[in-house]
Amino acid sequence: MAEEIKTRYSDEELAEFKAIIVDMLSKAKAEYNTLRSVVMHGGNNDIEDTSPSFKTVEDDGANQLSREEASQLAQRQYKFIQNLEAALARIENKTYGICRATGKLIPKERLRLVPHATLTVEAKEMLAKQGKH
C-alpha cells in the first residue's frame, strides 16, 4: 500500500503549534506594550521630578533616537503580533502549515522556529528570486 501524502497537520499537531503561538503571542504583546510605553512616555521611567532641570543637546538627541528606535521596534512587534494572530486563525480553519505557494506542508522544524510562516523555505527563495514576497 502506497504511503498517503499528508495534506494537513492533525488536530494534535495543530494543538502543539497553537500552544507555541499562544506563548509567543503573550510575550510579543508584553514586549509591544513596553515599547509603546517607551514611545509614549519618552522612556524616562517617570523620573522627571528627580532629574536635573537642564539637559544637553546630546541627551535630547540620544533620547529622541531611542524613542524613534522604540517606535520602529513597536511597529515591527505589532506586525509580528498580527502574523501570529493570523496563524491562530489558520489553525482554527485547519489550513495552518500549508505553503501558500506550493500547497505542500511546511516542515515542522520551520514552523517551530517561525510559527507564522506561510511559505516553505524553497517557495520563499523562489519568490525572492522572482522579486515577489
Image (spheres, rainbow, N blue to C red):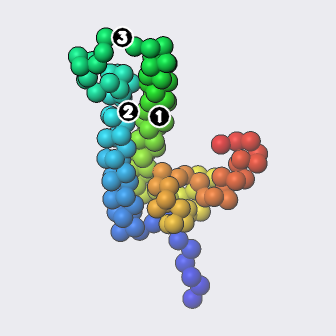
**1 vs 23, nearest the viewer:** 23
Q: Are marks 2 and 1 in contact (CB under 8 Å)?
A: yes
Which residue type does callout 1 highlight?
Leu
Secondary structure at numbered mark 1 = helix
Determine the image quadrant of residue 63.
top left
Residue 92 appears in the rendering: no
Which residue type does callout 2 highlight?
Leu
Q: Which mark is residue 73?
A: 1
Look at 48% across and 13% down and name the residue there.
57
Where is mark 3, residue-wise?
54
| Label 1 packing within 10 angstroms: few (<14), some (14-19), many (20+) | some
Horizontal and vertical percent for residue 84?
42, 47
Look at 53% across and 71% down and name the residue there.
6
Instruction: Give the mark nearer the N terminus: 3 vs 1.
Output: 3
Q: Quadrant of the N terminus?
A: bottom right
Horizontal and vertical percent for residue 16?
36, 64
Residue 62 appears in the rendering: yes
Answer with left or right where residue 100 lies relative to residue 54: right
Look at 36% across and 40% down and name the residue there.
31
Q: What residue occupies the far top of the structure in this picture?
A: 54
Where is mark 2, residue-wise?
35
